[in-house]
Image: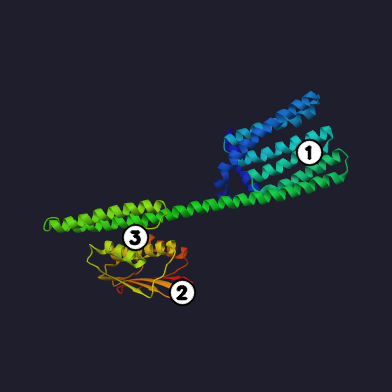
Amino acid sequence: MDTAGIAGRLNEWARHFEKLDPQRLSREEPLRAELLRQILKACFGLLTIQSAALAAIRVEWFWFFFTTVEPAILLAIVAWSARKRQTHLATVLLLVALSHMAAFVAARLEHLEFTGVLLLPSIVVCGLLVGHYFVLKWTAVCCGLIAWVTMSARADWRIAVAWSAAYLATAWLVMLFSRHMERLLETQVGAIVAERTRFAREIHDTLAQGFTGIMMQLNAAEQRIEGDAAGARQHLEKARELARQSLDEARRSVSALRPASLEGGSLLAAIERLGQQVTSASGISLHTVMEGAPYALSEEREAHLLRIAQEALTNAVRHGAPRRIDVRLRYHAQTVVLEVRDDGRGMDGQNTPGFGLENMRSRAREIGAEFRILSEAGQGTCIVTTLPTA
């Protein structure tokens, strides 16, 4: 018999019964598995103490089986399921074991406080191992168990009502805590994804752009290496300088520091330096103009505008084959407008840059800027980024 396959199917059934989100489960699985191992150790310790106490008072074999042997078997299956990474099947069986330990001990000793006290931790365990999705269902089971024990002991029904109220209050607190922890986990996952996206984008804007410039310089050097050794050497020096700058930018990107191009200069000057690096071996004429009185922007906004301009310049050189590129930076009272215009072949839907275009849009969104592309085939391209500053 394929016990692992049966356990897997039971685990899937447990997931379906608990109506759990598979994507959320995959993210939370390691944490819940570790909690399960720790709780399981505590349960084995509790069962050992309970077994010794019941053996000391020489309880009947029938009751001893349901209060000790049966929970021990269930806990052994829980441990086996946890080892096979069937966390959700193990959780369901663990809750059953806890409820039986509480209910049968109370029914035998006719002390409702045992059931009342022992069922409370099971609600907490449910919240920790499953989450808030299953807590209300398990709380209803606990209320049913306390009602059954109350009737078996012919006790005052108000005791069952009081314990049920305590269970509901505990469930509410556990659900609040569980939702809070799940939101924290979602926030952490979102932060990791955002950081990965940032890192990928910074690599694209530093290493990829730098490599493009290096390749252009090396191609130019190759064309001149036989007839113009001095010119070829000049292009090789520019390629070496680009490699050094790209390495510096990569190191700064890893540390999320201010781009080196912005240090000790204005935004337009930084754009002009990058533009000269991109166009130096292409014969393209680059012109930069500033309009209005410049004022300070946050480092994040300046860095994003610089990278948008760099991407627009690189795409123009690589895909547009222009003769001239104009960069215009306009400072208005409530907006800053960055405009990169070229007279190249334009975009017709087939030569549209992929990741670079989405990269520019993403950067614009992050700083709350409007991003537009004005282009027609054969009429050049104009990329306009409007940043509200008020």
Which secondary structure lies at badge 2?
loop
C-alpha span from label 2 to label 3? 25 Å
Q: What element carries label 1?
A: helix
| Amino acid beneath label 3 | Ser
Q: Which residue is drawn at 41% across and 51% down?
A: 255
- The 10 Å Cα crowd at callout 2, few under 14, some 14 to 19, many 20 or more, is few
Residue occupied by mark 3: 261
Residue that badge 2 annotates: 334
Q: Which secondary structure lies at badge 3? A: helix
Q: Single out the residue that lies furthest toward the front.
A: 264
Q: How many neighbours does mark 1 have within 10 angstroms: few (below 14), some (14-19), or many (20 or more)?
A: many
Assess disc 3: are there few (<14), some (14-19) or many (≥20) residues with their C-alpha within 10 Å of its C-alpha.
some
Kind of residue indicated by mark 1 = Thr
The Cα atoms of the two marked residues, 1 and 2, are separated by: 68 Å
* Image position of 183 with respect to 142: above or below: below
Examine the rendered structure and indicate whether residue 242 appears above or below residue 316: above
Foreground label between 1 and 2: 2
Nearer the camera: disc 3 or disc 1: 3
Q: Earlier in the sequence, mark 1 or mark 2?
A: 1
Q: Left or right: 293 with respect to 39?
A: left
Q: In this view, does 346 lie above or below 37?
A: below
| Residue 127 in picture, x, y percent from top left | 66, 46
Residue 307 in which image quadrant? bottom left
Which quarter of the figure is the N terminus placed in? top right
Q: Residue at x 64, y 49 (%)?
A: 178
Kind of residue at disc 2: Gln
Reading the image, the residue beneath label 1 is 115
Q: Tell me the residue at 69%/40% (across/down).
A: 95
Q: If you read the primary sequence from the N terminus, does the residue marked by circle 3 or circle 1 appear first?
A: 1
First in sequence: mark 2 vs mark 3: 3
The percent coordinates of residue 222 (x first, y second) are 18, 56
